[in-house]
Image (tube, rainbow, N blue to C red):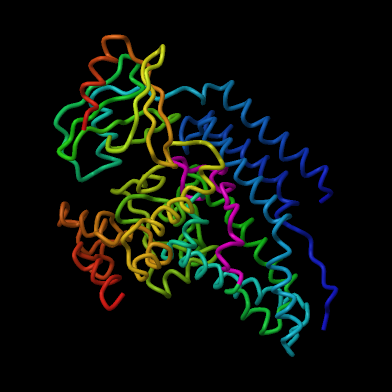
Amino acid sequence: MPLEILLVLVVGGIGGIALLLHLSGRSELLVMSREEARAAWLRHVPGDDILDVTVSHTGHAALVQTNEGPGLIWAFGADTVARHLVDFDLLDLEEGLAVVFHDYSAPRVHLQLTEAERQRWRELMRP
Amino acid sequence: MKDNLIYPDVVQWAVPFFIAAILIEFAWIALKNRGGRYETRDAITSLIMGAGNVASGILLGFIAWGFFMFLWELTPLDLGASVWVVVLCFVLDDLRYYWVHRFGHRIRWVWASHVNHHSSQHYNLTTALRQTWTGTFTFMMIVRAPLILLGFHPAMVLFAGGLNLIYQFWIHTEAIGKMPRWFEAVMNTPSHHRAHHGRNARYLDCNYAGVFIIWDKMFGTFVAEQDHDRVDYGLVHNLGTFNPIRVAFHEWVGIWQDVTQPGLTLRQRLAYAFAPPGYSHDGSRATSEMIKADFVAQHPEETGTPGLASRNLQAKGDRVYQFDAGPS
């Protein structure tokens, strides 16, 4: 196939499918309840004992206290990703916090938090 | 010898079909409200990975091609280009695919290339296109050497590989339940391949087939999709990024970080690169056998069920012994 036609097909195909998905509501972030966050954590880390779960006001993230220490679970598109909070930096943002993991496969998470939540989460995120 | 044998690049010609099939699957899911899920960024990442795979083939394909033509010059055998030779080549290349795919899950160096195909938590036709950019660096082209030395022309071998890849496109869907029994018995199907994409303990390291599921049945790696254990798609440690660069290279970065950490023996460094994924010198990580053993310990009623037979399990203490025993 001529390279020009392949390029048009690929770029047009990706762009068209992306537009279709976005316009049909497939870009919405997952919203978790406390129980959903608990279940999602155990899906990612099935061996953990969960001691407590704190869900952000948006429902897009939750802090999970476990027998292995604190962890963060957050909405990743329509799904979730979880990491124990062992090697990370925190940055204050206008809308909340940024968690910078020293992990090439999960580099950074932006958390939308109220001012009260930000103070509380900072305390809870200490290992 | 036929040095001028030419076949079409079937994967490139299939691109319009891929796009059309994705649109049809999405329309089906939207209309029926079942049969799978789509998410915008996940799908875009998968599609960009697919485009990158084609680009890497255009840029780096000369390496494998040069190697194959070198072998073709060496071999005195030439099976010709009849239809039956093409059919035989397709079947034998599928056996080749089975072993390359199995190595892709059992050797971390090869897994580093293949892992991105498993990195989506979704399972739809875009997932089929989430392909590697770094396959050349695994050197798995070596596994094709016997075919060429037996007298199958390199162009025919690549043509068979392209058809194999196209076959595998349609099995990346939740919109199809089970195919007729005879078909499920012989061919790789959406059901068999869903199990392959599972991160559930039961489904780790099973169903490596490309086209014919019989290879898994012959070599003891077949696990049927279980109604009571719904497939959970993705990786044991799921990625927290949609960035295609990170998706493509994260496991290579992980190998580099592990191999270069201070205080390891040479044997341990080599194991971080070539042992099964999940190896660690201090037992801090889990291989698929350990994950299965942990699962069975928590669910003893599942012992001996598909994917959880005792030969698939490995106690935690055994692993350090397996890779680290002996002089360094």
**Which range of residues does the magenta coloring cover?**
B117-141
Q: Is residue B132 magenta?
A: yes
Q: In the image, is A96 to the left or to the right of B1?
A: left
Q: Is residue A52 above or below residue B278?
A: above
Q: Residue B26 is drawn in which quadrant?
A: top right
Q: In the image, what residue occupies the spot 25% across and 14% down?
A: A119
Q: In the image, is B94 to the left or to the right of B230?
A: right
Q: Is residue B25 magenta?
A: no
Q: Is residue B70 above or below residue A57?
A: below
Percent position of residue A109, x then y: 40, 28
Q: In the image, is B145 to the left or to the right of A39?
A: right
Percent position of residue B212, x then y: 53, 67
Q: In the image, what residue occupies the spot 40% across and 16% down?
A: A93
**In the depicted view, which residue is nearer to us: B296 or B171?**
B296
Quadrant where the C terminus of chain B is found in the figure: bottom left
Q: In the image, what residue occupies the spot 20% across and 55% down?
A: B294
Q: Residue furthest bottom?
A: B76
Q: In the image, what residue occupies the spot 63% across and 78% down?
A: B145
Quadrant where the N terminus of chain B is found in the figure: bottom right
**In the depicted view, which residue is nearer to us: A111 or A54?**
A111
Q: Residue B7 is drawn in which quadrant?
A: bottom right
